[in-house]
Every structure is written in structure tokens, then in C-alpha cells.
Amino acid sequence: MEDQLLGIKNAAMSLILDSKDQKELEEVMLQFLGRSGQLTLALKELPKLPIEKRAEVGTLANDVKKTVEEAIDRKRAELSHQKVEEKKAKIDITNPGILPPLGHLHLITQAIAEISEIFAQIGFTRVRYPEVEWDWYAFEALNFPDNHPARDDWETFFIKTEPNPKKGPMILTPHTSSGQIREMERKQKPPIRMLNIAKCYRRQSDVSHTPMFHQFEGLVVDEGISITHLKGTLDYFAKSYFGENRRTRIRPYQFQFTEPSFEVDVTCGVCNGKARLPSLRSGVSGQGCRLCKEGWLEMGGAGMVHPNVLKAGGIDPEKYTGFAFGWGVERVLMMKEGIEIDDLRLLYSNKIDFLEQF
Ligand code: DAH
């Protein structure tokens, strides 16, 4: 029996050594260790041995089995390593490489990063407040009367839930101005220098409106804040974002949460605020600018924070004053030279061939 086992071992080892590929090796394995393999059958004979020999032969049989199994494992690893090496040898390194497709940030995400950076330079802290909001923050605390048109469901999306006893119905925030009150609550006390950039929602959808869009809202509250601080901030933003030669102007307007309120215009980048296109001879031609009305483009709203709003945010309007502004990210982006998108809805359509262009 011992001789038989040693014979099996020698035969197995030499066949394993000679196997040229995985398939041959698997065959050798079956031949010795399979259900009716030579070694398996020999092991089955063990119980038939006289009892005094069984232990000794049993140990030998186990050794043989272990040696054969280990040899198979080693050979298997060697063969697979060989295969990788062969494959490597076949790669033609002079072939030009294939570039993996590389994504990039969405156009609006890029704009948000740029706007945040501009305001960070003058000490505005970037915050982001809820998109699902209570009426209190979006309207009531901002001095909106009950019957204001923005509050009805033609303009605003309402969430079907029980109204909060103190904060009213739940809505999708229609503007980032809701962040004004939230920031006053968070900081408790001026100075406040906030930049809230978030998604807003309104019931609108056409070439220049999407139901979801982005606004950036600035709020500054401190002692002695005046319109000059607002105007300086507007000019700084227009120059940083649109270009050094741009100027801003403010026109009287009406918003519930600011008094006085303004619309902010920035000089047109095409005619440079002249309303007429430059001609080769005289510098100013008779041709009107296609892009703007009289040299100016409308950027958005701004104003001095209404005392009622400061009060609603827990701030003493006798001691503190503030200014605020709120503009559309999509809108200022479209006002940047060189960007022309015929239908704003394309921005959110997931059309890769469109988005790849920016
Ligand atoms: N929330 C206004 C809107 O969505 C924009 C706005 C106007 C924001 C004046 C302000 C502001 O902070 O002072 O139309």
C-alpha cells in the first residue's frame, strides 16, 4: 500500500509539472483527486487494512494528498501569472491611447461657485436654506399682506400637509429671501453678511422660465448700513462677474420686504451702455443695440431691509439697518457675454450633447 501511494504521488507530481495550461491541470486533478481518481480510490481502501497498519499508512496517505493539492495550487497560480504576462507582451504601446470620457460640473454649478467666490472675497458667508419651507419664512415674516398675488397657488407650489399653527402652510420656496429671516434667527445678532444660494420653485415654464431655478440672495445687517454700501456691493459684483468696464444703476421699485426698493441694472456688454452699436467712422452709429434697452440690462431686485422684516427676525430696527438683494443665477449667467441659450429649459433636460458644450 505504501508503495502504491508513493507511486501515485510521483506520477501526479510529474503530470502536474508538465501541465501546459489550466485545462490540462484540471484534468490531472480529476485523474487523482476526482471522485474516482487514483488517490481517492486508494484512500477508500484504508479501512480494509489491518488495524496496526492503519494509522501509519493513513498519515502517509494524507501527506501525499496534501503534497499533490499544494502542487496543483502552485501550478495554477503560475499558469495564470504566465497568462497575464503573455497578454502584456501583446499590448502595442505605440498605439494612440483611448481617452476616457471626462465629465464636468453643470453650467449652473460653475456659476454658483464663481458667484460664491466673488462674494467670499468681501466677507459674505455662503449659506443654503431649505427648499421646502414654511409660509412664515417665505412671505409672512417678509411683510407680505395676506392677499399678495405671490401667495396664491398660481405662483407658488403648496405641499399637501397640515399647516403649522405658527408658521402656516408648507410650500416650495419661491425665492431665496426666505433665507433672510432664517439667517437672522441663526445669527441672533448683527453683524450679518450672508449669501444664500438655493433652488427656488414657481409655477412657470417657457423659453425663459423653468419651474425650478436658482437665486442668490445677499443680506447685510449692521449698525450704520446705508444705500451707499448696497451700491458699492452691486458695482463690485458687476465688475467682478461681468467685467471691469461694467457699471450699475438703481431704479425705484417696490418689494414688500425692502424700503426703499430698487431694480438693479447693469450696463449692456454688447453696446457698452451706449444703446447704439459702434460704427467704424464715428465710434457711435445709428444702429440700435439688439440686446438691451437703452444701454442697460435688468439684473434683479434690491433694497434696504424693511423695519418689519428686521423685527420679525428678532433684530432691533432702531439700532440696526441692512440691505438685501436677490437675483437669478440663470439670469445673470445668460447676461454674461458669449452665452446664448434659446430655451432655458434645456439646462435641466439632461441632454448630454447640449450640456457638454459648456
Ligand atoms: N425675492 C425677490 C424675487 O424673487 C427678489 C428680491 C428683491 C430680493 C429685492 C431681495 C430684494 O433681497 O431686496 O423676485
Image: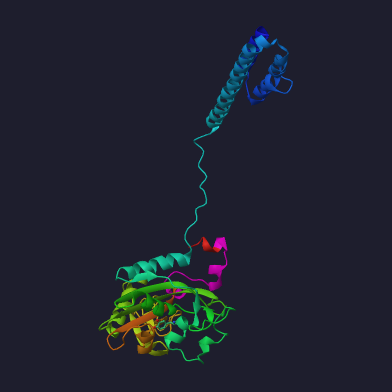
Instruction: Point out the residue furthest to the top here.
Output: 3
The reply to whether residue 7 is visible in this rendering is: no
Instruction: Point out the residue furthest to the left here.
Output: 224
- Find residue 240 and report its horizontal and vertical position in percent: 33, 71
Q: Where's ligand 1: which quadrant?
A: bottom left
- Find residue 167 and report its horizontal and vertical position in percent: 48, 82
- Find residue 353 and report its horizontal and vertical position in percent: 56, 61
Q: Is residue 18 magenta?
A: no
- Find residue 111 and report its horizontal and vertical position in percent: 42, 67
Q: Residue at x 32, y 75 (%)?
A: 193
Q: Residue at x 60, y 20 (%)?
A: 66
**Vertical relation: 126 (above or below) 48:** below
Q: Nearer the viewer, residue 58 or 127?
A: 58
The span shown in magenta is 330-353
Q: Residue at x 44, y 73 (%)?
A: 129
**Vertical relation: 342 (above or below) 323:** above
Q: Residue at x 39, y 70 (%)?
A: 127
**Vertical relation: 270 (above or below) 55:** below
Quarter that holds the N terminus? top right
Q: Quarter-wise, where is residue 320 in the image?
A: bottom left
